[in-house]
Image (cartoon, rainbow, N blue to C red):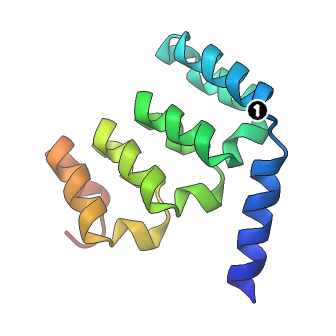
């Protein structure tokens, strides 16, 4: 029941961002300097739960994972995109993904010192 409820919440969060809002966010996000990413993501809390928006964000600036919803921090595709950009962003992933071999390998391949972020490496 909890997994179905979580899926419904994620779908609702994604549905609250219209196509126009998503396109505007992505346009603004891709034209911003990395120093402004936290400000932009804090100003747009609804997009933090939208997979398309956050996938684009973490692919460009891996540190954006810090601002993603908990559901997206547990989404393997989103986390992989983030750690492939910046291995250190593994620290923001859900615990189950910090133990996922593929995710850990991607993080360590990008930044070998990411291993220090894990309890068991």
Question: Which residue is nearer to you in this view: 89 or 85?
Answer: 85
Q: Position of residue 86 (x, y in %)?
A: 32, 37
Q: Which residue is mark 1?
A: 19
Q: Is residue 48 above or below residue 91?
A: above
The image quadrant where one finds the N terminus is bottom right
The residue positioned 24% from the left and 73% from the top of the image is 120
Disc 1 secondary structure class: helix
Q: Residue at x 78, y 25 (%)?
A: 20
Which quarter of the picture shows residue 85? top left
| Residue 60 in sight in this render | yes
- At 30% across and 70% down in the image, what residue appears? 119
Q: Is residue 86 visible?
A: no
Between 49 and 42, the residue placed more toward the observer is 49
- Judged left or right of residue 47, residue 70 is left
Q: Position of residue 46 (x, y in %)?
A: 78, 40
Q: Where residue 33 appears, x then y in whole percent?
A: 50, 11
The residue depicted at 19 percent of the width and 42 percent of the height is: 110
């Amino acid at each position: 029941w909890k997994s179905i409820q979580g899926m419904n919440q994620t779908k609702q969060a994604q549905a609250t961002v219209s196509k126009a809002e998503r396109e505007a966010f992505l346009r603004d996000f891709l034209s911003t300097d990395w120093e402004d990413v936290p400000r932009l993501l804090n100003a747009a809390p609804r997009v933090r739960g939208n997979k398309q928006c956050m996938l684009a964000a973490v692919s460009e600036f891996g540190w954006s994972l810090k601002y993603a919803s908990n559901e997206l921090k547990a989404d393997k595709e989103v986390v992989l995109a983030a750690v492939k950009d910046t291995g250190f962003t593994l620290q923001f992933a859900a615990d189950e993904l910090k133990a996922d071999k593929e995710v850990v390998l991607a993080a360590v391949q990008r930044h070998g010192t990411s291993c220090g972020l894990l309890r068991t490496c």
